[in-house]
Image (cartoon, helix red, strand yellow):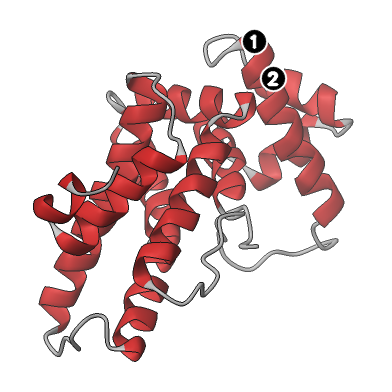
Amino acid sequence: MCSSATPRGPRTGRPRSAEADEAILEATRAALVELGWSKLTMGDVAGRAGVAKTTLYRRWANKNELVVDAVAVLFDELELPDLGSLRADIEHVVLQFASLLQRPETKTALMAVVAESTRDEPLRERIRGSIVDRQKRLVLDGRRRAQERGELPAEHDPVTVDAVDDLIFDVVAGAVVHRALVSAEPVDAAWVARLSALLVGGLGAAATVG
């Protein structure tokens, strides 16, 4: 699992406690579910986590940073095991992603930070760096495996590779978030099979999936 907090340079004094970090992030997610974004405070999180406010502020400068890192650590749970085919890999990670979005702490936290980021550029940048860019590892791993199996051709232009990886991530993440959180429709095996067929084989392939 990736580290939850963004490094800010060399530190002095006692080393950070991984247990304290975990308690703080868990308390943040619990407070979001119970209180919502607007009522959540750093003081409330510190009290729930059993740490001093100074401990909290040594790690995170403000609520925005704290909440994004509390969400990011949940997405770091996503894994892409090698299931032998690109379609199987896609279906697995999409179902895993959808299951994660159904957890109250994930749903509440993600919707809160996305809504708040519409008027906060630094928050958007932190979401991009801590969540989006980190989770693009799944696309990179999936594409590499598919190329090794001969399912996809090798790409030699780094600009093209980056653009395609961005597009794949946007399509998958956008489709699942819209389906699960905006439309509130089930992300079940049948829907996921059609999505993976669309990604791998195009519209014609998706139409043949029952």
Residue 196: quadrant of the picture: bottom left
State the image coordinates of residue 204 (x, y, percent, origin top left). 10, 53
Report which residue position mark 2 lands on: 31
Which quarter of the figure is the N terminus placed in?
A: bottom right
The answer to whether residue 147 is seen in the rendering is: yes
Q: Is residue 158 left or right of residue 20?
A: left
At numbered mark 1, what does the secondary structure look like: helix, strand or loop? Answer: helix
Q: Is residue 164 left or right of residue 30?
A: left
Q: Nearer the viewer, residue 149 or 138?
A: 149
Residue lying at 49% horizontally and 39% vertically, measured from the top left? 98
Is the residue 115 above or below the residue 53 in the image?
A: above
Report which residue position mark 1 lands on: 35
The answer to whether residue 41 is seen in the rendering is: no
Q: Is residue 158 left or right of residue 193?
A: left
Residue 99: quadrant of the picture: top right
State the image coordinates of residue 135 (x, y, percent, origin top left). 44, 58
- Local packing at callout 2 (Cα closer than 10 Å; few below 14, some 14-19, many 20+) is many
Which quarter of the figure is the C terminus placed in?
A: top left
Q: Are dots 2 and 1 in contact, CB under 8 Å?
A: yes
Residue sticking out furthest to the right: 50
Is the residue 164 above or below the residue 20 in the image?
A: below
Residue lying at 64% horizontally and 17% vertically, measured from the top left? 33
State the image coordinates of residue 22 (x, y, percent, origin top left). 78, 46
Disc 1 marks which amino acid? Leu
Give the distance between the C-alpha atoms of the residues marked 2 and 1, in whole angstroms.
6 Å
Numbered mark located on residue 173 in the image: none
Disc 2 marks which amino acid? Ala
Q: Nearer the viewer, residue 104 or 209?
A: 209
